[in-house]
Each structure stands twice: as C-alpha cells, then as structure tokens.
Image (cartoon, rainbow, N blue to C red):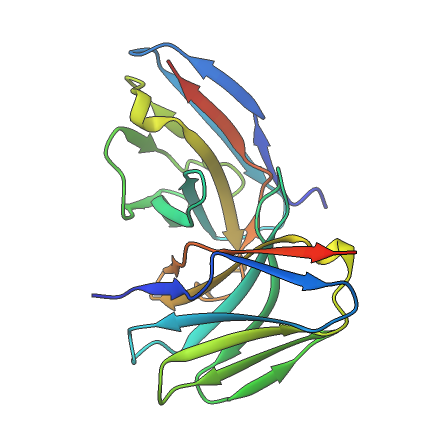
Amino acid sequence: NAGVTQTPKFRILKIGQSMTLQCTQDMNHNYMYWYRQDPGMGLKLIYYSVGAGITDKGEVPNGYNVSRSTTEDFPLRLELAAPSQTSVYFCASTIPGQGNSPLHFGNGTRLTVT
Amino acid sequence: GESVGLHLPTLSVQEGDNSIINCAYSNSASDYFIWYKQESGKGPQFIIDIRSNMDKRQGQRVTVLLNKTVKHLSLQIAATQPGDSAVYFCAEASVYQLIWGAGTKLIIKP
C-alpha cells in the first residue's frame, strides 16, 4: 500500500489564483481529513469527510472547498489564494467506522502565496 | 473551551538518556489521546495512544502516562537516539477530529 499520497509537494501561487491539492489513499479508509500547519504550530482542521459524498467543515474552512466523490480521493480546492493561506497542508485518513483511531498522514503540500 | 497544550517548546536530551515530553489538556470528558512524531518535511506519524480508562501504556521504547486528576499526559522515550529528533505532538480526540497542541521539539545532543 502507498498509504496517503499528496500532490504536489510544493507550489507557489500568486494572490487570487486557484488550485487543487490532491489527496488519495489506498487503504479503504472512510474518514479523511485536511489540515493546515503554520510554522511552529500544531495542525488545524480545515475539512473532513466520513465517507464518499459526505463532507463537513472543520475549525478553519474559510477560503477552501472539498469534495469526496470516491472513497479514495479527497481534493482540497483554493479558489482565490490569499497570503494567509501560505502553509503546509496535510491530508490524513483513518480506518472505517472509528473516527478516533490514529490518523495516517501524507507528507504534505507546501504552499506559498505571494 | 477545549485546548491541548505542551509545557515546553524545545527539549534537549543527551543521547542515551530518557526523554519526557509533557502535555496538558483541558477537556475532562476527553477519552482518547494520541502522541505523534513529526520529522522535518514529513507528516505526523502515530507513536502511541491511550484511552481514559488506562493510566499507562507501553510500546517499544515509549511509554505514555495519563493523569486524569490533573489532566496531564506525558510521553517517555527510553534511551533516546538520534533518530528520535523530531517535533512531538499530543492530540486529544473529540468526536471526528483531533485537537492538537503546538508541539515540542526534541533535540538529541551527541
């Protein structure tokens, strides 16, 4: 299993541009999450999904959108990039039916908005 | 509100010594806690977890202690090695999400 795979690894955007951060997992995990991590800080939840077709907002959803059309994929969309969205983005997943089980993380996407 | 915090942002330990990383939480109703290790340029990696019906759990070279009376948990790493250098996060489970502390950076001195 590849686990949780995120692409791209790095990206630089200009203010107002849009992009999609890709996340896919091959572990048949129902629960998937998007976090952002600012320098020297912990992780903040952006959006999460408990299964295909179901998404919900986390702590910091403004400026982002998600979709979950399949169990494997959970893309994160930035429509109008702002400097405040400069961060490292992590996607994570966990085993079916147990939202409190340990998360499996991807290696992150480092995004800079200038 | 809920919060999870760490006592020390940086911890320097001599190679071979034991490391103790501390974490405080505020939600007494939380029943599940997890320690993660994050190496530079990587995502967090699960180390060990503990549920509130336990006060101690041991893994390979790691032990987590939970003190519900003072809402405190700690991660003990035995015989610290250079590969243990990382940022360590405690996280408190709340419904579908985790509440993360800011992290403690563990530095290993040769």
Residue closest to the eye, A27 or A76: A76
Query: Residue B30 sits in which quadrant?
Result: bottom left
Query: Residue B7 sits in which quadrant?
Result: bottom left
Residue closest to the eye, B106 or A94: B106
Answer yes or no: is residue A8 visible.
no
- Residue A61 to residue B24: above or below: above
Residue B83 location, x and y as percent?
Answer: 76, 54
Locate residue B96 relative to residue B1 in the image: left or right: right
The residue at 45%/66% (across/down) is: A100
Residue A112 location, x and y as percent?
Answer: 44, 21
- Residue B97 to residue A22: above or below: below
Say which quadrant the C terminus of chain B sits in. bottom right
Residue B74 location, x and y as percent?
Answer: 52, 75
The residue at 57%/86% (across/down) is: B56
How many numbered marks are there? 0
The residue at 47%/27% (across/down) is: A21
Say which quadrant the N terminus of chain B sits in. bottom left
Residue A52 location, x and y as percent?
Answer: 42, 44
Q: Residue furthest left?
A: B1
- Residue A27 to residue B50: above or below: above
Answer yes or no: is residue B48 visible.
yes
Query: Residue B94 sits in which quadrant?
Result: bottom left
The residue at 31%/12% (across/down) is: A15
Residue closest to the eye, A92 or A87: A87
